[in-house]
Amino acid sequence: MAGAARLGPGVEELTLLEKLLGLPKGNKYGVQGERKVPVLQTNNGPGLTGLMTIAAHLVKQAKKDQLLGSTAEEKAVVQQWLEYRVTRVDGGSSKEDTRIILKGKCHTVQKWPVEVLLDFCLTLICTPVLDKSGSITSGLFFSRYDLNLHLEDKVYLAGNIFTLADILMYYGLHHVMVDLTVQEKEKYLNVSRWFNHIQHYPGVRQHLSNVVFIKNRLYTNAH
């Protein structure tokens, strides 16, 4: 684990994910660029690059595809939060970044013409829902703006199912949550409740420090 930590947080998270998924050790990781983007070396062909790509590969390798979502809508939501994780959470470092990180939501927009949705998607970096043939449907698109609000009526990021998005968002936000004051934890009450739930999900936390929350505040003020 110490070697993984030296390669950067992305590789460390992937080794945590491997253990959570019950995969045997042996994968060889490297990093590329100043941002230490993780690379998984493979025996056949070029390696896999990027936290999202490698994590999805590990999930499929472990035959736990349900972690990527079961329905088209769930898959789109999971993908959206994974994109948010690598584009926003990994890029944030300041206190202001922290506040922005805790404000990023998947917002459902329905019944718009496909052309409008496409423009909306390209502008806000959204993820469309595809039908079985791979064509874009006009049913659901997702934008991001408030993580705390998104979790107001949800147990997990994708609703009522535990997914890869919860795992990687937990790992990505751990360094943020561990430094929050009691007042800040209460300010982002829904995020705190979700985070506390995920850190107690079997096998997730591993060697990471336990973040302490005042539980009666988390649950009596949840709604």
Image: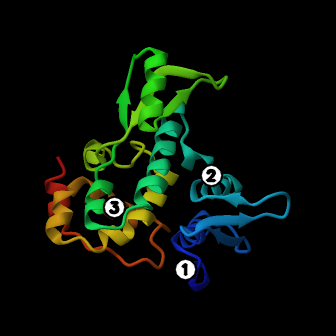
Residue 220 lies in what quarter of the image?
Answer: bottom left
Q: Earlier in the sequence, mark 1 or mark 3?
A: 1
Where residue 211 appears, as percent x and y from the top left, is 31, 73
In percent of the image, x 37 and y 30: which residue is there?
108
Amino acid on which the number 2 mark rests in the picture: Lys
Q: CA distance from mark 3 to mark 2?
A: 22 Å
* Front-most of residues 12 and 101: 101
Asked if residue 200 can be seen in this view, the reply is no
Q: CA distance from mark 1 to mark 3?
A: 22 Å
Q: Earlier in the sequence, mark 3 or mark 2?
A: 2
Q: For the residues carrying marks 3 and 2, which lies nearer the camera in this image?
A: 3
The residue singled out by tag 1 in the image is 5
Q: Is residue 66 left or right of residue 172?
A: right
Is 2 located above or below residue 152 in the figure?
below
Is 15 located above or below residue 168 in the figure?
below
Where residue 217 appears, as percent x and y from the top left, is 14, 62
Residue 199 lies in what quarter of the image?
Answer: bottom left
- Classify mark 3: helix, strand or loop: helix
Label of residue 28 in the image? none
The residue singled out by tag 2 in the image is 64
The residue singled out by tag 3 in the image is 195
Q: Earlier in the sequence, mark 1 or mark 2?
A: 1
Q: Is residue 90 left or right of residue 96?
A: right
* Front-most of residues 168 and 200: 168
Is 37 located above or below residue 155 in the figure?
below
Residue 185 lies in what quarter of the image?
Answer: bottom left
Residue at the far bottom: name it: 2
* Front-most of residues 30 and 22: 30
